[in-house]
Every structure is written in C-alpha cells, then in structure tokens.
Amino acid sequence: MSHTENCLFEPKYQVVTDAQRWAWYMKQSAAYDIYHTLHYHKLDNRGEPILFVYEEEGMFIALPLLKRGIDGADFCDLTSSYGYAGPVSNRKFDQLSDSFMNNFKCSFAGFMRHNRAVSVFCRLNPFLHQSCLMEKMGGLRSNGRTVYIDLTQSLEAQRAGYVKRLQRQIRQLRKREYQIKDADSQEEIQLFTQMYQQNMRRLQAGNSYFYNEAYFSSLLTNSEFNCKLILVYEGEEMICGAVVVWMGGVIRNHLSATSESHVQFSPSKLLTDEISIIGRTLGMKFFHLGGGVGGKEDTLFDFKRSFSDLLMADQIWCYIGDEPGYNQLVAQKNIEEDKGYFPLYRNV
C-alpha cells in the first residue's frame, strides 16, 4: 500500500512523550484501557514509548506505540505493549468522518516515512470498536476469538452458563479450606513472582512472558490504572494467584500462576469465579478472559470457553509502511517461508 494513496497533502501530527500530556489525551478519550497508558508502555523494555496524535478541529486520534530499533539496519518498526491497545479518540470511532480518518491515515503514513518505520504490529481492543478506523489503513487481520463474561446478568445465571463439569469442580474447590485474599506485602509479590516464573518454565513459555518482581511491583503500585494481586492460600502455602486489572467497565486477569504442587486441583478455576465476583463488586460490566495462545483455539482457550459462550473477534493490525525496506529485512534474515508471524524479519 502506498503512503500517498488518497493523500493530497500531509496533515500535521505530534509525537507525545511527556507524561502529563500523554495522560491528558487518555483522560479526554471517549474510552481507553490500561494498555494505552504511558506507565504500562514504560514497563516494556523493547522500545521507546511514544504517543502518535493527529488532531483536527477539536477532535483527535491517539495511538500509543513502542518505537524499536532493528539490529543491523537503518530502519525502525513500531508495536504496542502486550495486551489490547490500538487507537483511542475523543469521539466514538463510528462517529468519525471519512475525511478525518483519511487525514489520520495520511499523517501516520508521513510519520512512518519520516522515521523510516518499516512496519507496525498492534493488537486491537475488542471493547473499543476500532476496526472501522483501522480497516481503512489496511493490514487488519483476524486473530481468532476471545471469551468474556457478562457481569450484568445475575451470578446464578452466570454460573449456570459454566459447563457442567466446571460447575461441579468449583463447588468442590469452595469446600476446600482455601483462603482468598489481596496481596499486602512485598514478600507476597516476591513469592508470586517465583510461582509465576516456575509456571512459565513448566509451560515452556517464550522469554517475553518471564516477568520479574520489579515488573509486578511497578504494576501494583502505579497511579494510572487499577491493579491488584489476588492470592489463594491453602494454610500457609500460596497455591495460586492473579494480577487483576480493571478500567472502563472491564475487568481482566492480566497474568496468573498456579503452584506446581496444586496444578492437579485447578485452583485457578476457583480464582476465575472469584474474580467475576470482585468485578461485580467494583461495578464492572464485563470480565474479559481473553483467548488462546497466538489466537489459537487451544487448551487455554478451551479453559476460558468453559466459563462462557460469549465470544468476541480478536483482531491485529499488521501494517507494512515501507514494502521495499520490509522485503530487504526479510531477505537479510534469509527467511524463505512465511508462517504468519509479523513482522516476518523478527521471526528468528
């Protein structure tokens, strides 16, 4: 796709890195999520956090990104931090005019060209309905489906929607002498981190999933969004836990882990049920469970699907701004087969 397609001129844009200015745009947005905040992007050490902003006659579209250098090349590329990000605006996306969205597209194309940015990868937020904007940019792809629970229904109706086996398992788990509590000490954060990393090793997860204690501490003490660590104990032993985040009517289990000694008992099922209750107490409308690894309908997806039959499309934005540059990087890496990874030159 050409940068200049349908672009008669290049509208001006700004790149925001200042914390106060970034926060101002978020607070002016019709809706945003934790994944759009500067604090969340600063936790990701893969690149420089920037907020691209196009503004016109009191309306704006803002897109949080990480700007990453590319080893051995005079290019960069762009991505967003782990989670559900994409653009935000002070208008609902379906209320934006075609001309305004086209001007955003042209200004972003100019930004990519001036920064020698080859590509952008971004996972969209299914609750913000961003696709009507992003489909105009090109590069919008399906990434499977994600699961959510409607917390506006009664708790009885919610639980009646669980698969029968899950209903029985949760009843049995609630009969065990487990204690569920919020973490209230650094020692608990440390123990959870150890349990989480052991969990990742057991699952043979990629390096990008191995978060350390400093990451969890920074999440839990931030001032930009709501976050807490919920733990399950059997006696004095921590057996399960989850970092829970909530904003804009949606609660999520951001990252969780189960002790190897208790995997067979699946206390995470009890914890998931408990998070739905916490979400109700906090006035949330939805509990977003997410999907499978890499958008696949795998065992993780099946686990989440056992709690609800409510599904949302998961979409990613895979945009190539400089096709010759992109192809050059792929050739330099001697990559001959495209297995769907984006950007392909980073699949090494």
Image (cartoon, rainbow, N blue to C red):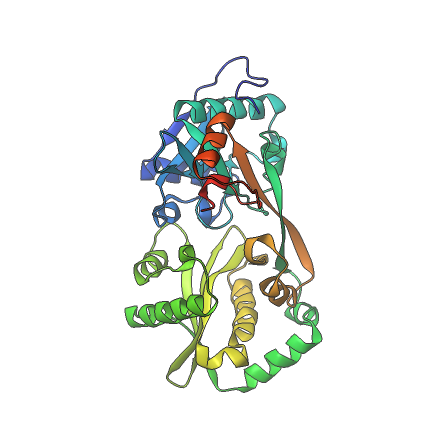
Nearest the camera: 26 or 119? Answer: 119
Q: Is residue 19 left or right of residue 287?
A: left
State which quarter of the image contains the N terminus: top right
**Where is 261 relative to 321, above or below?**
below
Q: Residue 335's spot in the image, x, y percent?
A: 50, 41
Q: What is the quadrant of residue 195 in the picture?
A: bottom left
**Where is 225 relative to 133, above or below?**
below
Q: Residue at 59%, 17% (x, y): give it.
A: 6
* Outermost top residue: 8
Q: Residue at 54%, 81% (x, y): give it.
A: 265
Count of picture labels: 0
Q: What is the quadrant of residue 139 in the picture?
A: top right
Nearest the camera: 309 or 207? Answer: 207
**Where is 222 relative to 276, above or below?**
above
Q: Residue 108's spot in the image, x, y percent?
A: 48, 26
Q: Residue at 30%, 70% (x, y): give it.
A: 185
Q: Is residue 211 left or right of residue 244?
A: left
Q: Residue 55's spot in the image, x, y percent?
A: 47, 25
Residue 52 in sight from this viewpoint: yes
Q: Residue at 37%, 43% (x, y): give it.
A: 38
Residue 62 in sight from this viewpoint: no
**Where is 202 relative to 28, above or below?**
below
Q: Is residue 193 left or right of residue 123?
A: left
Q: Residue 32's spot in the image, x, y percent?
A: 49, 44
